[in-house]
Image (cartoon, helix red, strand yellow):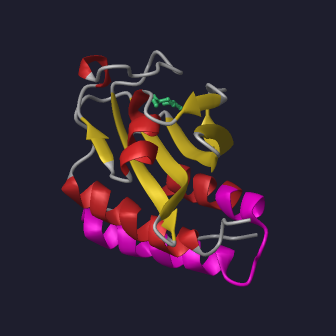
Amino acid sequence: MYQFAMADGQDKPALYRDLAAALEAVTAGEPDPVANMANAAALLWEYLPDLNWAGFYRAQGRELVLGPFQGKAACIRIPFGKGVCGTAAESGRAQCVADVHAFPGHIACDAASASELVVPVKRDGRVIAVIDLDSPTPNRFDAEDVAGITALAVILAGRIGE
Ligand code: SME
């Protein structure tokens, strides 16, 4: 059993430092990418407030395919360039979307989603997966979330490849 003590009233950078340490702990020495993505999704869900979906899409050729996640059952395949996830995969850049309904081509998997953050996981400059967070609250994510999730993506880059 893993149990992580979460301090009350932490600021976001501190929360993300703790989350990164927890992710390091549960993935260190484990080569299986599914196991590591599954534990990462569980930690995102446990640590980050106000989410309705947290998980992974994995790059397979020019398509993203659903990976381990927490939340409602979701769209399985997203072409590169489509939706928020496909835009992050195509551009290699994080997409922080304050209002998903205003994002051209947004793919609505859960009608409750109002804002979204998608961060690519890159290995040797190539996008191998994206981390996708959805929130029912508009404008839920900011630059501190982008920085925090990007740090997690760096940890995962070496731990979720084939
Ligand atoms: N909204 C995403 C699709 C994935 S779900 O949010 C889980 C998108 O537009 O790419």
Task: Name the residue at 66% across, 75% down.
Answer: 27
Task: Name the residue at 75% across, 57% down.
Answer: 34
- Vertical comparison of 148 with 95: above or below: below
Horizontal and vertical percent position of residue 64: 60, 39
Asked if residue 107 lies left or right of residue 31, the reply is left
What range is drawn magenta here? 11-37
Q: Nearer the viewer, residue 111 or 45?
A: 111
Q: Quadrant of the N terminus?
A: bottom right
Horizontal and vertical percent position of residue 134: 43, 35
Horizontal and vertical percent position of residue 147: 29, 64
- Vertical comparison of 77 with 10: above or below: above
- Vertical comparison of 37 with 30: above or below: above
Q: Is residue 80 magenta?
A: no
Q: Is residue 28 magenta?
A: yes
**Residue 9 visible from this viewpoint:** no
**Residue 34 visible from this viewpoint:** yes
